[in-house]
Image (spheres, helix red, strand yellow):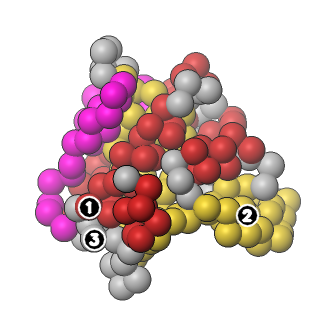
């Protein structure tokens, strides 16, 4: 894995590393309650300091082969509308997608567009064998994104995640290299 964070382009998005001057925008987007409620690792409340630390640590996490975090930016305007990540298990040649989109930009296909580009990067540039993701059983929108990009439903892990004092079901989705290549 190279040390510099990649920059990926899609039809409508530029996926690139965040810069420190975007910390306040990130802070504002992530502080929407639905973001933390539907993600595993985003704390609530989300502070400006957390946003700054997140941005500061992204390059090192990529350099060590652990995690790719890219901001979803609208190509035409440069506006930051969300984040896309790929957590990498080098040992297993596998990646785990994560994403969120700010409320004002949802239901426009941005998450699927970004996730598809990062999945392709995982297979082509990182040599992954498998890319998958999970969402809470109640998060139908995220499940649709995963199916839209070609991940297959693999099952439900019942009450597998404790979120805000509630045991949540996790829906699992994934694809493997052969299926991804066949779909090209």
The crowding category of the residue bearing disc 3, from other C-alpha atoms within 10 Å (few below 14, some 14 to 19, many at least 20), is some
Task: Give the left or right position of residue 171, taking residue 168 as reference.
Answer: left
Q: Residue 29: x percent and y percent?
A: 52, 29
> Compared to 2, does 113 lie above or below?
above
Q: Quick one: label 1 or label 2, which is nearer the N terminus? A: 1
- Secondary structure of residue under mark 2: strand
- Secondary structure of residue under mark 3: loop
- Magenta-colored span: 1-26
Circles 1 and 2, Cβ within 8 Å, touching? The answer is no
Task: Give the left or right position of residue 66, taking residue 124 as reference.
Answer: right
Q: Residue at x 23, y 61 (%)?
A: 125
The answer for how far apart the CA atoms under marks 1 and 2 are is 28 Å
Q: How many marks?
A: 3
> Compared to 51, does 77 lie above or below?
above
> Compared to 120, does 114 lie above or below?
above
The crowding category of the residue bearing disc 2, from other C-alpha atoms within 10 Å (few below 14, some 14 to 19, many at least 20), is many
Q: Which mark is residue 23?
A: none
Question: What residue is shown with label 1?
Answer: 124
The answer for how far apart the CA atoms under marks 3 and 1 are is 6 Å
Residue at the extreme front: 182
Q: Residue at x 44, y 55 (%)?
A: 183
Q: Residue at x 73, y 64 (%)?
A: 170
Question: What residue is shown with label 3?
Answer: 127
The reply to whether residue 125 is visible in this rendering is yes
**Circle nearer the viewer, 2 or 3:** 3
Question: What residue is shown with label 2?
Answer: 170
The reply to whether residue 51 is visible in this rendering is no
Instruction: Return the residue nearer the eye: 170 or 61.
Output: 170
- Secondary structure of residue under mark 1: helix
Q: Quick one: label 2 or label 3, which is nearer the N terminus? A: 3
């Amino acid at each position: 894995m190279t040390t510099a964070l990649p920059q990926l382009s899609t039809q409508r998005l530029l996926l690139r590393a965040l810069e420190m001057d975007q910390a306040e925008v990130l802070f504002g987007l992530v502080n929407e309650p639905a973001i933390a409620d539907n993600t595993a690792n985003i704390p609530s409340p989300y502070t400006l300091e957390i946003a700054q630390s997140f941005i500061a640590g992204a390059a090192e996490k990529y350099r060590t082969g652990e995690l790719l975090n890219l901001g979803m930016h609208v190509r035409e305007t440069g506006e930051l509308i969300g984040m896309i990540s790929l957590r990498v298990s080098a040992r297993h040649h596998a990646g785990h997608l994560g994403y969120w989109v700010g409320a004002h930009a949802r239901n426009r296909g941005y998450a699927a567009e970004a996730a598809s580009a990062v999945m392709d990067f995982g297979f082509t540039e990182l040599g992954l064998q498998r890319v998958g993701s999970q969402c809470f059983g109640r998060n139908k929108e995220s499940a649709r994104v995963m199916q839209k990009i070609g991940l297959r439903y693999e099952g439900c892990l019942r009450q597998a995640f404790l979120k805000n004092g509630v045991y949540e079901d996790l829906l699992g989705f994934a694809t493997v290299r052969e299926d991804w290549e066949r779909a090209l």
